[in-house]
Amino acid sequence: MSDITLQRTAIEPLAANVHRARFSIPEALTWQAGQYLQLKVPGVADAFFSIACAPGRGELELHIEAHPEQTRACAVMDWLRQHDQVQALLPLGRCYLPELPEGEVVLAVAGTGFSQAKAICEDLFARGFEHPVTLYWGGRTLEDLYWKALPEQWQSAHTNFAFVPLAEGAIEGAWEGHHAALISAMRCDRHDWPRASLVACGSPNLAYGVLDAAAACGLSEARFYSDVLEYAPRG
């Protein structure tokens, strides 16, 4: 874990309230795909964000959702717009694949949880992972899938990758919410759960919902990865 200075190089809009912040980094800095960092912005506590890219690219990116009512995230964005340097503590978290799995990988994502899944997918592609990778991305509306074009590109470029967008208007039938739709889609698809690894990037309700559904089909909890296991453990 290091306390370092990040040099902000760009801020780009990905949606109305989602921003992609990019930073140059020291060459020696590395992390595991799926980990997160803390930005040390004056006056802002607990500014934690998933690192939205795999290591080894010479830069670091974050996806920051900042609706007007999200005062903490808005304060972070204001700081980044006004300053080209920011202190950060990283890497943090245990939601990463410690080695290449011997079976398929399933990622269950809500909202900006996509940033964490993006880093993991990029890392799997870079390391030549050959087993199936399926990304389920849920949101209230299609607009919540703020960079849908990227996993669509992955699906065209990688024969072992499948993308399942889940939002009202993206699937047929009655809409019961993206958590329920995501779990239902996972149950309907034919995954080899006894050999699979499952990564959940979202709220505790989402994470434990997909865990319970997959465990009932044979997933080993030892191959379940999510930050909620650290910040919101059961029991």
Image: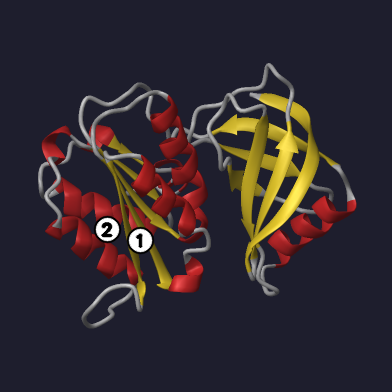
Q: Secondary structure at mark 1?
A: helix
Local packing at callout 2 (Cα closer than 10 Å; few below 14, some 14-19, many 20+) is some
Asked if labels 2 and 1 touch by Cβ distance under 8 angstroms, the answer is yes
Query: Farthest residue in the bottom direction?
Result: 174
Vertical arrangement, residue 55 with respect to residue 217, above or below: above
Which residue is identified by label 1?
205
The mark tally for this picture is: 2
Q: Residue at x 64, y 71 (%)?
A: 16
Local packing at callout 1 (Cα closer than 10 Å; few below 14, some 14-19, many 20+) is few
Q: Amino acid at mark 1?
A: Asn
- The image position of residue 172, as x and y in percent, is 23, 78
- The image position of residue 216, as x and y in percent, is 11, 50
Q: Amino acid at mark 2?
A: Gly
Q: Is residue 206 left or right of residue 79?
A: left
Which residue is identified by label 2?
209
Q: Could one spot residue 190 in this view of the protein? A: yes
- The image position of residue 206, as x and y in percent, is 35, 59
Residue 174 badge: none
- The image position of residue 121, as x and y in percent, is 41, 38
Q: Could one spot residue 46 in this view of the protein? A: no
Q: Residue at x 70, y 19 (%)?
A: 27
Q: Residue at x 43, y 49 (%)?
A: 153
